[in-house]
Image (spheres, helix red, strand yellow):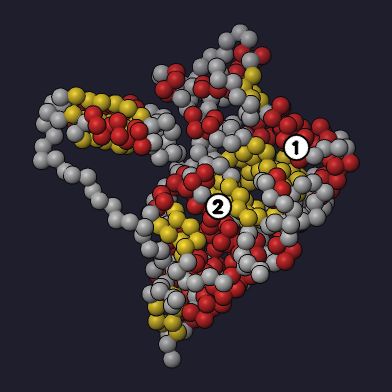
Amino acid sequence: MPLTSDRIEVTDALEAIEYCYRHNMTDGLPVVPPTEKRVAEFLTHVGLSPGDKIAEVTERARIITAEKLAVNAVMAGCLPEYMPVLVAAVEALADPAFKFNHLASLGSPWPLLIVSGPIVRAIGMNHGMYLFGSGNRANATIGRAMSLLLWNCCELRPDAIQRGQLGNPHRYSFCIAEDPDTAWEGLNEWEGHDRSTSTVTAFSGYHLCMARTECSVARGILAPLVNAISRHEFSPGCVVVTIPPNLEKLLVDQGWTKRKIRDYLFEHCKRSVKDLKEDARWGRLTATHVGDLKDLVPAAPGDEDRWIYLFKRNPQLDPYVFHEGAMGRRADILVVAAGGDAGMTIGFYQPYSQSTNPVTKPITLPRRS
Amino acid sequence: MAFVFLDPRQGPATGAVVPAHRLSSLTGKRLGILWNNRPSGDKLLKRLAESLHQKYEFSEIYFTKKTFIGNAAPQEVIDDVASRVDVAIVGVGD
């Protein structure tokens, strides 16, 4: 099957880059011009034909074909070996549970891609020092390829449907990997796959946050994280937590599994009704439940002892604080073993406040007979 | 010698959007409002309905909502609105 994209003819490669600027095909950075030969190499690597359907983004009435994915991957600077990850990433973003339309939100959420499993080593992804920083080709260009694909094929641009009030610096590229040698179960296993199956998890939030600890005992390591998650935007859902290997070792040595960390955060991430009222969060989001109660509400006696849990539901109190949709979505802590092996910094990425769920897809290409 | 590259834009659309039948007049018609549950959108839409009612004197105004802004309205909600009204407004407010 031939490539069907329109051909654009210019004088040379530099002029092709300038053409992409003039025609709003790029994120503001230069792109690698996607020639037929290079795009064909990408498709050959995964054994896909140009017209093969990767996924349908129903909210945009768009089918993402292998050709358009490969074209945008080339532009982002990817290698053909990254295509299996990109295919799974597109499948994740198009999954109904991800709720694609939230990406147009005023809050400017953007998905973090997390790669877990053997492919991390196979394609040389960074899961260590400078985890979220620049410098690794796979991390940088896989994330950028998703951004360009949605820019060029799903109208996710500020001149189209994307109405983000501030925008999001993660939009340029936001992709990390998990340590494939973690002593814990991998994110791939946490999400229901075996350790030998590589996966991509797409998870949409606002901004990367951090919690620094000075302790070596488990509860001391996690205390700043509990406080930071609870004090940040207080919205139920999944929170991605990255724990670096030195802290992972301390926790493992004290018998802390990912599940135990999850359960601990579930039990301790909470705020008092008094606190929430003073923070103007009481009734702010829930006009249907509390009428016109949208401004500051004075705390009442006893409010300091009434607790709203972030991850555990309380049908009597929750409607005063949380979006209806956020309460109905998956609540979880996705612990990712990743980060540099020096320092005491835990990263966390909180969910977009209302809709969206993390979606994990196995990487199945290229198929080996 | 020319340099040729591929246009990265737009995959094929999966289907055409067929606009709903347009009424010749709104006067005396049944107006439906489907609020998407965005905070304060109910107030905005009710004010809009009041304003339109002064002009078109609707025979009925039916106000309903979908469960949550981030999800598409369930088919039963769409069917309910379609069965009750002649024209509907779907909107957002914040």
Discs 1, 2 touching: Cβ within 8 Å? no
Q: Are marks 1 and 2 on the same chain?
A: yes
- Residue at 63% over, 30% down: A311
Crowd class of label 1 (few under 14; some 14 to 19; many from 20; radius 10 Å)? some
Observer able to see residue A314? yes
Observer able to see residue A187? no
Alpha-carbon span between mark 1 and mark 2: 24 Å
- Position of residue A339 measured from the top left corner of the image (x, y, whole percent): 75, 52
Q: Quadrant of residue A224?
A: top right
Q: Is residue A96 left or right of residue A191?
A: left
Frontmost residue, A140 versus A259 = A259
Mark toward the start of the polypeptide (1 vs 2) = 2
Q: Chain of mark 2?
A: A
- Amino acid type, mark 2: Ala
Mark 2: secondary structure: helix
Q: Chain of mark 1?
A: A
Q: Quadrant of residue B22?
A: top left
Residue that protrudes farthest toward the right in the picture: A253
If the image is split into quadrants, where does the C terminus of chain A sit?
bottom right
- Residue at 41% over, 22% down: A288
- Position of residue B9 measured from the top left corner of the image (x, y, whole percent): 41, 66
- Position of residue A138 measured from the top left corner of the image (x, y, whole percent): 65, 65
- Amino acid type, mark 1: Arg
Give the residue at mark 1. A259
- Residue at 59% over, 45% down: A358
Q: Is residue B23 left or right of residue A191?
A: left
Mark 1: secondary structure: helix
Give the residue at mark 2. A92
- Position of residue A104 measured from the top left corner of the image (x, y, whole percent): 44, 47
